Image (spheres, rainbow, N blue to C red):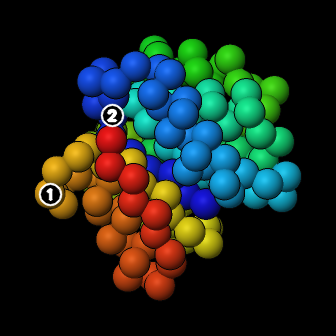
Amino acid sequence: MAITGTRSTGHRDLAWFNDLFGTYLGAFAKDEAHFYIGGVVGIDSLSLLWLAGNTKSQITIVAPGTVEQQPDDARQAISKCRNRISEVVELGADELRTVAYHARNRWMVDRSDMVIGFPLEGPEGNSGTWQTLNYGAQRGKPRLIVPV
């Protein structure tokens, strides 16, 4: 499963996200499950921490460039969960711009059977989260959309 979501998570507390992930990721987090997560802050880091601490599922982190290019909080989450991460994929983009993140998102979706998205509440927009969810739909993959 590919996980996508907003980087803006400061409007909710950690307990709220833990409950949310327990409900919506926990339902799919069987031992044989494999989650692809981007390596940035927000939903990426929070879902990584939850999956690593609460499941035995496989976890692949996918960075558009390198992990070293990611924000400090994201690198810390990856480092903290390193013993639970099955694989780190660095796609090698020189510049971390929208095109690199979209390429990363497509890479994750192409290797997944489903897309789980956590967009900000409100109408569908042009965010990377919605781009990823819509790309999954274009590829005929089921989507679970959980507004935060």
Judge by depth and name the residue closer to the eye, 67 or 140: 140
Precedes in sequence: disc 1 or disc 2? 2
The residue that appears at 56% across and 40% down in the rendered structure is 21
The residue that appears at 55% across and 50% down in the rendered structure is 24
Marks 1 and 2, how far apart in space? 17 Å
Q: Which residue is mark 2?
A: 7
Residue 37 can be seen, yes or no: yes
Q: Is residue 147 left or right of residue 115?
A: left
Q: Mark 2: give few (<14), some (14-19) or many (20+) Cα within 10 Å.
A: some
- The relative height of residue 143 versus residue 3 in the rendered view (above or below) is below
Q: Quadrant of residue 62?
A: top right
- Depth check, mark 1 against mark 2: the one in front is 1
Q: Is residue 1 left or right of residue 65?
A: right
Task: Look at label 1 and name its amino acid.
Answer: Pro
Judge by depth and name the residue closer to the eye, 67 or 78: 78
Residue 90 can be seen, yes or no: no
Q: Is label 1 in a helix, a strand or a loop?
A: loop
Q: Which residue is mark 1?
A: 123
Image x and y of residue 123, in percent:
14, 57
